[in-house]
Amino acid sequence: MRLSPLSVDEALASLRTGRDGLAPAEAARRLAEFGPNRVEELARESLLAGFARQFSHFFAIVLWVGAALAFLAERYGPGQGMSTLGVAIVGVILVNGVFSFWQEYKAERAVAALRRLLPQTVQVMRGGALEQIVAVDLVPGDVVVLAEGDLVPADCRVIEALGVRVNLATLNGESLPKARTAEPSQEDSPVLARDLLLAGTSLAAGEATAVVYATGMQTEFGHIARLTQAAGEAPSPLRREIARLSWLVAFLAMGLGVAFFLIGQAMRLPLIESCLLAIGIIVANVPEGLLPTVTLSLAMATQRMARRNALVRHLPAVEALGSASVICCDKTGTLTENRMAVKRLLLGRALLEPAALADRPELAARHRQLLLNAALCHNVKANRAGGAAAGDPMEVALAAMGRRAAGWERAVRLDEIPFDTARKRMSVLCDTPEGRVLYCKGALETVLPACEAVEGDAGVTPLDDAERARLLRAEDELAGSGLRVLAFAHAVIGAGGPPTDDRGLTLSGLVGLEDPPRPEVPGAIARCARAGIRVLMVTGDHPRTALAIAREIGLVTDASPRVVTGDELRRLSPAQLQLALDGRQLVFARVSAEQKMTLVEALKKKGEIVAVTGDGVNDAPALKTADIGIAMGLSGTDVAREAADVILLDDNFASIVAAVEEGRSVYENIRKFLTYILTSNIPELVPYLSFVLFGIPLPLTIIQILAVDLGTDMVPALALGAEKPDPAVMTRPPRARKERLLTWGLVARAYLFLGVMEAVAAMAAFLSVLARAGWHRGEALASSDPLYLQATTACLAAIVVMQVVNVFLCRHPRASSLAFGLTGNPLMLAGVAVEVTLILAIVYTRPGAWLFGTAPLGPEVWLQAALFALSMWALDELRKVWARRAGGGRGPERPANGSARARSPGSTP
Ligand code: ATP
């Protein structure tokens, strides 16, 4: 549908609507007719393809090879049960694939559910009243009101536009914003038509009222979405790390399998036995449940983060958050409450409290222009239903003060120069009963150069240098007490040419507003200091206001910290800036959004992992450049939210710190279950080595290995992935960018320490059952011999008993297992319960015996395994004591380069 070149009224008529919008009943009817305003997301991968992927990844291929070997062995030596083994391995691949698919599906659903938590909303006129609705409910004929930073929710024809510029990058890649007006356009292409606003683009500046003419898949964006495939996300460092790990482990498994096959052949073992060896070693080494558990633990972390008010938009952001080393943070609304209250007024030479205006009407009358300015120069939307006004809380406070004191507000706005962080001021041109007046408000240093006169106690006088200096001093003083200071100026426009806010203004006074710090922020700042995370305040506000607030929240403690202003920043070369960033306590003030990006780039060059907050349109580049872009959910624009990785639901700095804590714990948790899963590989491997090296009967069958890897180990591993953040996680420096998931410390603990102890217990269980029955070395045992069945069952049972204890040891690499309560992680107890039930079922039930080749055990076997488990627990606890003493804390294993980046706590603010 094309609405150009219709006039506004023709366009409205053709859509059977008016400037007051649709009646609610008609909107509901149209919603039923046209359907929801949603561009159907293209499924990146069909369910079937996702399902198939679970059977073709590297681990699965290794297992397929194992199964093929078994079937091959059956061919050359039929009747020895090798085909049953082959079928069992294929069964494992299937069970594992289905389980992984289910976990991935659950993880994806969890992330998608989070996205739905914060739907895009839009201001719409319905039956003459302005309402906020979710963009999905828009219908053709709706009249929407859009402001700077809003995403255009559907294809619209402009009805009114004030300084509108749109960013069309999503449609045509063009990065320069283009103007849009209500004038009918002759352009044929909707993208070029100057009277249209298209879905998927965003308002870079200005305000618009527009009528919707196409929604959902009918929009231009919908057409494009149909044609193009969404680009896939680049793999995150964690994914790459996991992939590396998978290859490593799978190659190890294959290599060892082949090597043992050859050793078996060299020892002249029958082909069947060599194959059995190879398959056993492959199956023992592949950590089958690893990949889906990683995905699921990331997804669970996003849910925990959402509960703590940080909404993660992409899974990889979870781990990036965990390694953040610098947080560049706005002041207003994030560190402070954004609850503005006017505290001081500088009118003439008098510094007053706002209450003075009510007490002294002559004062209000004398400074009427300032009050009218406050009442008129803003973008606050009055709520017709009588509720709270919507808009920037500072403007709400100023408008309320102006309206109360001036008591008059009949004015027509003719034009507006909107606020932007570079100009730091905003102006409106109004027709008032007192004539046409330009009102300007903003930072004093940008307003003062445009002023030629000042309103004082004795009326309007020319502005001389002494007066300028006095005003700047007064501003400094107000800012020094933490107030945000705004200057107000105006000009009555006569016939003297077009109005401008660059010159000829009369300064009417200064207003100081208080915006208290959020109460939880000082605590969060202190946590960051302990966690080795540097917090840099990067604000557009006055240096002294910034410093006062920074002191109040404990961000700055030095007597003479460095405050770098935007002007200074502009003069610094990239090298100078990088060196300046070495400074101990730094605050950045009067910084524009573009400079924020320069700062982020400089920090990244220094090797920092940077998180940056932002809310405005101009913040989008910095949000994209940073390792973690964090947008404000309450005050942020759609554009900032789109550019961000994380959205703060409450705009609160403390929520960022909570998210960092969750991000760090996820990494630690992955390490915990990795330790757990890898440990049991050794007691699964050693029986095969002993079989070859010592010529004893095979102590553990392949099916029994699978019973551990895919049965008893599964839920406890998941439980380790769901561990709550360890309080100590925020007392360590951030992880280094290059730090590996699989450290030598972890491998040594899993394979050489815990694994070896488990192997000893497993072999002891096997051999003692045989020894008690009088078996001696060299004596042959048939694979169906009840004694042999009982001995392998004892080996399996010992591994599981050891793993039951191991799950508690794996809760932390250094802290004692006794330091953790049993109730903190319900999945942990469930995991152990499942593990115990499964092994009892395997050992004592008929189907268990049939499936896994087991025989019932006497109590002495369990007792012996329990003694070994107790010894492992005691030895690992001793190791932990030693590690704590040596490491001086409860930190995890850390490679040597991990500490190179660690800052001493004293160097963080
Ligand atoms: P932060 O960047 O930490 O959120 P901020 O809100 O003070 O701090 P900006 O929004 O960039 O930063 O504002 C910079 C300055 O511009 C403010 O200190 C104020 O002097 C002025 N200013 C802010 N908002 C307005 C506005 N709506 N109208 C006029 N001037 C404004």
Image (spheres, rainbow, N blue to C red):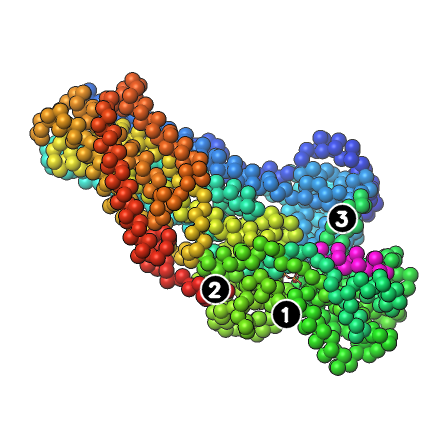
Cβ at disc 3 under 8 Å from ligand 1: no
Q: Nearer the viewer, residue 11 or 394?
A: 394
Q: Quadrant of residue 676 in the image?
A: top left
Q: Is residue 457 above or below residue 759?
A: below
- Find residue 179 and report its horizontal and vertical position in percent: 71, 57
Q: Which residue is mark 1?
A: 544
Residue type (three-letter) at the residue carrying disc 3: Ala
Q: Residues within 10 Å of mark 3 (few under 14, many from 20)?
A: few
Instruction: Farthest residue to the right: give it.
Output: 433
The tag earlier along the polypeptide, 2 or 3, is 3
Q: Residue at x 69, y 55 (%)?
A: 339
Q: CA distance from mark 1 to mark 3?
A: 31 Å
Q: Are marks 1 and 3 in contact (CB under 8 Å)?
A: no
Question: In this image, 419 relative to 64: left or right?
Answer: right
- Residue at numbered disc 3: 388
Residue 397 included in the magenta stretch of the image: yes
Q: Which residue is mark 2?
A: 908
Task: Identify the image quadrant of the N terminus.
Answer: top right
Kindly indicate the quadrant of the structure image that contains residue 870.
Answer: top left
Quadrant observed for ligand 1 in the rendered image? bottom right
Q: Which residues are magenta?
A: 393-406
Name the foreground residue: 230 vs 290: 290
